[in-house]
């Protein structure tokens, strides 16, 4: 299962989803109700679970269009070759990008999840809102320090090309910027109603060149909040578009370590 970040578009994951399908995985990339001013984290989780239990998984075709981060889940087929997320017999891997990290623990309460992978994720604490996460983690100061080290003007107006599209191939950057989706503010005031991070094996994957959530910052947050060391690969905040082969290789490695060989058996 592939969950996007802000904007909620499954398109963000399309290059990774195709590669996972080619490797034998069964993939569902989720569109979140990002434009809905009434939708908070529970509604995002509802949309994710509904997508997994009702959608036709990707097995080679391009998933539905969408734009910037994504949440997704890959379901390892059972002995009959079919995915069983709906019936509870499958092994679900939840992969959550950026804001999708707030959705992942809610999905773990409702599906048989065997592994969570956070990709440039906003790692939350129980009871936290996405809106409070920024100051609580020190993200603004970390981004400013990173800008200063790199010689970027730290007080300039926010520029999506500088922080999101800087390492994308030109055609992908144009496609992503042209289709940038609306993100309502509702979810940023929605509290994460869990008592603790779910008791599910979790991996943290960081884009080494992320200018929005600098790698050093992400490593600290992963250590402080989950007690985990983050793995790094080349790529910025939209690493699934910038470096889909490396993301796919890591996801397959994590899934095979947790579940065994991927693909029909």
Image (spheres, helix red, strand yellow):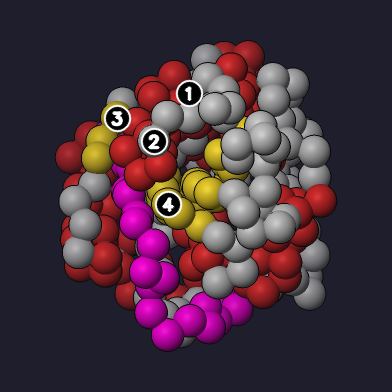
Residue tagged 4: 115
**Contact flag, marks 3 and 2 (Cβ < 8 Å):** no
**Between marks 1 and 3, how big is the CA–CA gap?**
10 Å
Residue tagged 1: 244
**Between marks 4 and 3, how big is the CA–CA gap?**
19 Å
Asked if residue 193 lies in the magenta stretch, the reply is yes
Which residue is at 66% across, 32% downward?
Answer: 81
Residue 173: x %, y % from top left: 59, 23
Q: In which quadrant will I find the C terminus?
A: top right
Horizontal arrangement in the rendering, residue 51 relative to residue 13 (left or right): right
Count neighbours of disc 2 (C-alpha within 10 A) and say few if under 14, some if 14 to 19, many if 20 or more: few
- Which of these two is toward me, 124 or 48? 48
The answer to whether one can see residue 255 in this image is yes
**Contact flag, marks 4 and 3 (Cβ < 8 Å):** no
- Say above or below: 55 vs 241: below
Query: SS at mark 3?
Result: strand
Query: SS at mark 4?
Result: strand
Of badges 4 and 3, nearer the viewer stands 4
Count neighbours of disc 3 (C-alpha within 10 A) and say few if under 14, some if 14 to 19, many if 20 or more: some
Q: Characterize the magenta stretch by its predominant secondary structure.
A: loop
Residue tagged 2: 260
Which circle marks residue 233 in the picture?
3
Residue 61: x %, y % from top left: 74, 21
Horizontal arrangement in the rendering, residue 179 relative to residue 191 (left or right): right
Horizontal arrangement in the rendering, residue 48 relative to residue 235 (left or right): right
């Amino acid at each position: 299962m592939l969950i996007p970040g802000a904007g909620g578009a499954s398109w963000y994951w399309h290059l990774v989803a195709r590669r996972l399908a080619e490797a034998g995985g069964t993939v569902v990339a989720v569109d979140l109700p990002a434009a809905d001013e009434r939708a908070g984290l529970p509604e995002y989780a509802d949309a994710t679970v509904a997508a997994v239990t009702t959608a036709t998984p990707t097995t080679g075709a391009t998933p539905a269009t969408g734009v910037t981060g994504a949440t997704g889940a890959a379901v390892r087929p059972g002995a009959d070759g079919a995915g069983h997320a709906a019936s509870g017999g499958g092994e679900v891997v939840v992969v959550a990008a950026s804001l999708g990290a707030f959705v992942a623990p809610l999905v773990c309460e409702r599906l048989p999840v065997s592994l969570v992978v956070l990709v440039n994720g906003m790692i939350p604490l129980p009871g936290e809102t996405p809106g409070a996460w920024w100051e609580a983690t020190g993200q603004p100061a970390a981004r400013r320090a990173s800008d200063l080290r790199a010689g970027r003007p730290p007080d300039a107006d926010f520029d999506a090309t500088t922080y999101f599209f800087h390492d994308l191939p030109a055609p992908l950057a144009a496609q992503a910027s042209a289709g940038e989706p609306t993100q309502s503010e509702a979810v940023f005031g929605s509290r994460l109603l869990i008592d603790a991070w779910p008791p599910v094996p979790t991996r943290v994957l960081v884009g080494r060149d992320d200018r929005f959530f600098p790698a050093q910052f992400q490593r600290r947050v992963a250590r402080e909040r989950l007690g985990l060391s983050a793995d790094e690969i080349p790529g910025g905040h939209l690493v699934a578009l910038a470096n889909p082969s490396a993301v796919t290789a890591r996801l397959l490695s994590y899934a095979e370590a947790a579940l065994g060989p991927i693909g029909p058996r």
